[in-house]
Image (cartoon, coloured by chain):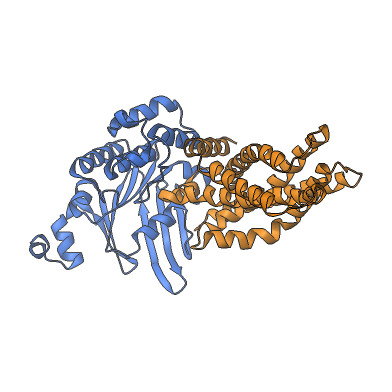
Amino acid sequence: MRAALAILKKDLQMEFRSKESILAMWIFSLLIFVIFNFTFEVSRLVMLEIAPGLLWVAFIFSGMFGLNHSFAIEKENGNLRSMALMPVDGGQIYIGKFLSVTSIMLMFEILIFPIFVIFYDLQLSLQMLMLIPVILAGTIGFTSLGTILSAVSVHTRNQQILLSLLLWPLVSPIVIWSVNLTGVIINGEITASFYPLLIRVVAFDVIFFTLAYMLFDFILED
Amino acid sequence: MSTPALDLLDVSKDFGRIIALRKVALRVELGEFVSILGRNGAGKTTLLNIISGISKPSSGKVELFGSDPSDTVNKSKLAVISHEMFLYGNLTAIENLEYYARIYKVPNMKERIESLLHSVELTHRRFDLVNTYSRGMTQRLTIARALLHEPQLLLLDEPFTGLDQHAIGMLTKLLLEQKRQGRTILLTTHDLHIASELSDRYVIIEKHQITHNGPMKDTSPEAIRKKYFSIDTEVATA
C-alpha cells in the first residue's frame, strides 16, 4: 500500500493547492441545482420524485470532470510513463488513483449536499443517514470503473468523449440503482427491498474494483 | 563470466508496418558507460523504452541483470532521464522528490533529498513550485529525481538537450561521479564530444540496427563523425 498512499498524498496535495477539481465540480453542480430549481414550477411531491435523479446527475457529471482531470495531470511531463517505470505492480497504482479520485469526489459530495438540501427543501431526519452508504457505494462503483477507463482514454486524443462512451454503458446500472435507493430514502419509504438493492450495488463495486485492479498492469504498458 | 547489466538478443520492434528496431544485439557489462549514437528516428529512444520495460519487443529477448526488465526488482535498479521530466509542476521540488522517495522506499529520505538538491544546486528553490522553474532548473531536478534511489542502471535519453553550459557541466560532473561509483550508464546523444568524454564504448544505430559497436578510447569524435555519419568535420564545424 506504500505506493498507493504516496500517489494519494501527491494527488491530494495538488488538489488542495489548486482546488481545480473540487471547485469546478461544485460550481457545475450548483448550476444544475439552480437551473432545475428555477426552471420547473412543480409541486413538492413531484420535486421529491426528480430530486434523487438531479443529485446523481450532479454527482456523475462532476465526477466525469474529476476523472478526466485525475489522469490529465499524469500525462503532464510524461508522468504516466514514470508510473510504468515504478517498482510496484499496476494494482498499487490503480488503488492510489482510485483512492484519490474517490476522496476528491466524496469531498465534493459533502460540500454540495447541503446546497441540494436547501434548494429542494428536504427534511433532515435520522433516516437520511442511510444516504451515506448509498452515496458511498454509488460513488465507489463509479470511480472504480472510471479510474481504469480514464487511464485507458488518457492515451487518446478524444479523451473526454472516449471516457464517456466507455463509462456510461457500464456504470448505468449502478447509477440507476443509486438513484432508486436515494429516492427511497428521501421519500422516507425504506422497505425490505432496499437492502438487497444496496447489496447489489456493493457487489458491482467489488466486481469492478477487482477487475480493474487485476487489469491495470496492461493499461500502463505501451 | 558475470551476469551483464544488460543483454539484448536479436531484439526487433515494429509498430504495424513501421519498423523501429531490427535484430539488435547488445551486451553491456556492469559499470560500463555506453553511448548510443544515431540520427533522429534511428530507433535510439525505442531501444531505451524496451530496455526500461515500458515497451515490449516484437521479437527477441531482453535481460536486465539476468532477468526480465519488467521485473519489480529490476525496476527498482533502474532510472530514466529523458526529455519528459517525470515531475509535477504543481508540486514543489521537495514534494516531488518525497513522492518518488516514498515509491522507491529511499532510506533516510530527508537527508538524501537535501544532499541531492545541494548537488544540483537547487537548495534555495526547494520550496518553490516546479512550474516556476526554468528549463535548466527543471532538468537538474529531473536528474536529482533519477538519482534519488541510487539506481544501478541509468538510461539517459538526450539529457543534455536544452541545457545551458553551466547545467551541461553540472550534469557531466554528476555522470562522471555515477560512473566512478560503478553504475552502468546508457546515454543517447547527438553530442559526440560529450559521448567521447564520458563513455567507455559507443554504439551506432543506423536504419534501426546496430552498425558499429566499439571502444571509445580507439576513436575520436571527429573520426566517428567522418566515418559513420559521412559528414566532413570541416563542413560540419563551418
Q: Is residue B70 visible?
A: no
Residue drawn at x 84%, y 49% is: A197
Callout count: 0
The residue sitting at the bottom extreme is B17
Q: Which of B69 and A75 is in front in this view?
A: A75
Picture coordinates of residue B62 (x, y %)?
45, 56
The residue at the far front in this view is A41
Query: In the image, is A210 to the left or to the right of B31?
Result: right
Residue depicted at 9% across the width and 65% down the height: B235
Please state the horizontal and vertical placement of residue A143, each as a whole percent of the image.
Answer: 65, 48
For image coordinates 29% across by 34% down, the residue present is: B120
User: x%, y% of residue B215?
Assistant: 23, 53
Which corner quadrant of the image does residue A162 belong to? bottom right
Q: Which chain is blue?
A: B
Q: In the picture, which chain is orange?
A: A
Q: In this view, does A118 lie above or below A169?
A: above
Vertical relation: A78 (above or below) B167 = below
Q: What's the residue at 49%, 33% (across, down)?
A: B102
Nearer to the camera, A144 or B174: A144
Residue A124 coordinates in the image, percent (x, y): 78, 34
In screen coordinates, is B205 left or right of A71? Answer: left
Quarter of the image that includes the C terminus of chain B: bottom left
